[in-house]
């Protein structure tokens, strides 16, 4: 184990950091220095800098029925509850149409682990969506939802994922990772399964040809060692994906737990703690190119600052986000504000798709000419 300077230099030379290196970085109070090296690490992945990307997408929570009962979730309702719902197909299609109408390319469709929805429900819904919107990217369903589909249908995980892909699923989001260590998982979400269950589901998806993203949620009272184990487990999983020629994880996102309206008591993570963890993640996870900022939980200003701590992407405009909002986290960012914030951070904004392919770069002279500007004032 070296000094912080030795560890940071080791990282930018391309050498892998160890758990012990990570613990030394967490023990340091030189957050700005760690952030500066994380920014250098980002640059090694992104020669197109200062271009900073974002995606126009919508979250559709097709149902709030869930039998996993996570202590940190304020969104779910048990089956039979007066506030439980499953959206009709027509409502879902209308929401997608509204997304397409404003230049959207991505749908993040998620619900709970519904105990009564069959695999055929999901397959039919995906087929219907793709028949109406063949070009929309379905970046949908958590690992927990997919494992519930396998349980309800009594089919192997690989068969379920293959069927979903054939019906129109394009990629898997990283939801449900929380902290990939079982001490914390058993405390906050005992029924969601072990960290190995999450990794297994993602790796089956990789083998079936789906790309995924990875997330980490901090602020549950987890230790720094648990955060680092999470990072290392993602890094090792990405190594295995690359070894079989799979795309694996396209992005990594650090979120912060929002305790309001939940059954968990916790102190909100400070901006400094978030930025430090983000920067260390960028240094530790050397085989994932894209890191998204977490403006939904931290707010636009911290989101802007995170572009100097290892992030290259501003995430999604996230039309209609309900799960985090249920925990009284109300940061909403529309397309125009994302463009403004990226500009204020000294970067050049560019719209991308879910595969991180750039669709449009917004040069300065295009500022007043963006063709998907929200004229009707709808919040994205």
Image: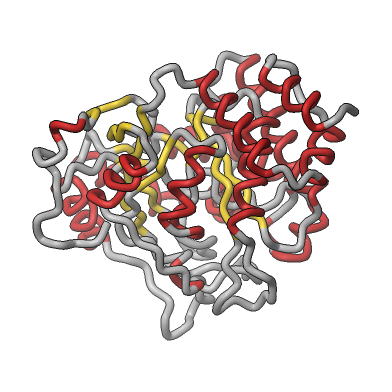
Q: Tell me if residue 258 comes above or below residue 13 in the rendering.
A: below
Does residue 80 appear to the left or right of 354 in the view shown?
A: right
Does residue 219 appear to the left or right of 299 in the view shown?
A: right
* Farthest-out residue, bottom: 82
Q: Position of residue 53 (x, y in %)?
A: 36, 34
Q: Position of residue 362 (x, y in %)?
A: 22, 32
Quadrant occupied by the N terminus: top right
Q: Position of residue 371 (x, y in %)?
A: 10, 40
Q: Quadrant of residue 41?
A: top right
Residue under the image location 83 percent in, 41 percent down: 23
Residue under the image location 70 percent in, 45 percent down: 197
Q: Position of residue 365 (x, y in %)?
A: 14, 31
Instruction: Note whether residue 327 is visible.
Output: yes
Does residue 285 appear to the left or right of 224 in the view shown?
A: left
Residue under the image location 10 percent in, 60 percent down: 376
Instruction: Note whether residue 147 is visible.
Output: no
Q: How many marks?
A: 0
Quadrant occupied by the C terminus: bottom left
Colour convention: secondary structure
In this view, the residue in front, 364 or 150, is: 364
Does residue 186 appear to the left or right of 288 in the view shown?
A: right
* Farthest-out residue, right: 1
Residue under the image location 76 percent in, 63 percent down: 221
Q: Tell me if residue 84 comes above or below residue 68 in the rendering.
A: below
In this view, the residue in front, 231 or 11, is: 11
């Amino acid at each position: 184990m070296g000094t912080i300077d030795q560890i940071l230099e080791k990282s930018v030379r391309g050498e892998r950091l160890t758990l012990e290196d990570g613990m030394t970085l967490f023990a340091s109070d030189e957050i700005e220095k760690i952030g500066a090296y994380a920014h250098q690490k980002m640059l090694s992945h992104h020669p197109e800098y200062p271009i900073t990307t974002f995606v126009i997408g919508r979250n559709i929570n097709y149902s709030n029925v869930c039998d996993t009962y996570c202590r940190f979730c304020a969104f779910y309702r048990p089956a039979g509850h007066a506030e439980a719902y499953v959206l009709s197909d027509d409502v879902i299609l209308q929401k997608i149409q509204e997304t397409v109408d404003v230049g959207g390319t991505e749908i993040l469709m998620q619900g709970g682990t519904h105990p009564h929805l069959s695999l055929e429900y999901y397959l039919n819904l995906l087929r219907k969506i793709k028949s109406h919107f063949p070009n929309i990217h379905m970046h949908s369903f958590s690992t927990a939802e997919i494992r519930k589909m396998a349980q309800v249908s009594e089919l192997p995980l690989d068969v379920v994922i293959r069927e979903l892909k054939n019906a129109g699923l394009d990629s898997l989001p990283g939801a449900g990772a929380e902290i990939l260590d079982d001490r914390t998982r058993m405390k906050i979400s005992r029924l969601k399964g072990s960290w190995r269950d999450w990794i297994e589901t993602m790796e089956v998806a990789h083998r079936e040809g789906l790309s995924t993203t990875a997330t980490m949620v901090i602020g549950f009272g987890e230790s720094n060692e648990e955060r680092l184990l999470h990072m290392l487990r993602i890094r090792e999983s990405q190594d295995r994906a690359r070894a079989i020629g799979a795309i694996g994880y396209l992005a990594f996102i650090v979120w912060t737990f929002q305790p309001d309206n939940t059954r968990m008591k916790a102190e909100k993570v400070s901006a400094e703690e978030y930025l430090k963890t983000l920067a260390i993640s960028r240094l530790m996870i050397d085989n994932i190119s894209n890191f998204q900022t977490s403006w939904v939980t931290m707010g636009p200003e911290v989101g802007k600052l995170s572009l100097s701590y290892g992030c290259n992407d501003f995430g999604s405009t996230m039309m209609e986000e309900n799960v985090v909002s249920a925990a009284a986290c109300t940061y909403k960012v529309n397309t125009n504000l994302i463009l403004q914030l990226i500009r204020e951070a000294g970067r050049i904004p560019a719209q991308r798709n879910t595969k991180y392919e750039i669709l449009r770069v917004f040069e300065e002279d295009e500022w007043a000419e963006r063709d998907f500007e929200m004229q009707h004032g709808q919040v994205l």
